[in-house]
Structures are given as structure tokens and as C-alpha cells.
Amino acid sequence: MAQFLRQKLGPMLLRPSAAVQPKQIPKRTFSSSAQHEDAEETVKWRNITILGYIGCTLLGAYTLIGGEHHNEERPEYSYLRIRNKEFPWGPDGLFEYKDEHH
């Protein structure tokens, strides 16, 4: 019995009625300019990004190419580096740079 009802009533239930279906699909016109604005924003931010890359590259090049930083010479005071006994590892301190003019 249930199968008989499904066979007879099924197509009627699945077929939408003419009153429910609209005759024409309305066109959405209120968002038609969004694509144009999105394209403009994309181009704007692409250009800003490119200018940022160029600016950072130029700043990095200017920083790296700039003059070399030279350390100031230390004053030769008589009380500096006084050693009464030689260290086992040589004339220089353990954590100092090797001094070539000893």
C-alpha cells in the first residue's frame, strides 16, 4: 500500500506547483559595482606592497653599503694588563683577542 501511494503521489509532491515558482529570476543590481571596487583595491594594495619592497631593499642596501664601523683605539695606560706571572695559555688573556705585537 505504501509503495502504491509513493508511486502515485511521489511525482506530484516532487513537482513544484506553478504558483510557487517565480516567472523570472530577479537580477541583483545593488552589488554590481563591488567587483570594480575590489579590482581597484587589489591594484592599490599591490602597488603599495611593491613600493614597500623597493623601500626596504633600498634601506637595507644603504645600511649595508654605508661606511665601515671602526673600533676606537684603546688608550695605553700603564696600569692596564699588568701581569706578574705568565698564564699557562700564553701572554694574552683567556677570553681576549690575540695581540700580535707582544
Image (cartoon, rainbow, N blue to C red):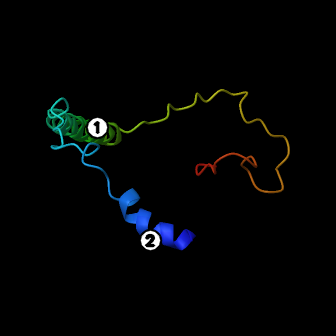
Q: Amino acid at mark 1?
A: Tyr
Front residue of this view, candidates 24 and 64: 24
Asked if the residue at tag 2 contacts the one at tag 1, i.e. Cβ–Cβ closer than 8 Å, the answer is no
The crowding category of the residue bearing disc 2, from other C-alpha atoms within 10 Å (few below 14, some 14 to 19, many at least 20), is: few
Residue depicted at 31% across the width and 38% down the height: 56
**Kind of residue indicated by mark 2:** Gln
Q: Which residue is mark 2?
A: 7
Mark drawn on residue 87? none
As rendered, which of 46 and 82 lies closer to the eye? 46
Q: Which label sits in the foreground, 1 or 2?
A: 2
> Splitting the image into 4 quarters, where does residue 19 fall?
top left
Left or right of residue 6, residue 66 in this image: left
Provide residue 59's location: percent of width, then percent of height: 30, 36
Identify the residue position indicated by label 1 in the image.
62
Seen at 20% across and 32% down, the residue is 31
Task: Using the rendered view, name the quadrant where residue 23 is placed.
Answer: top left
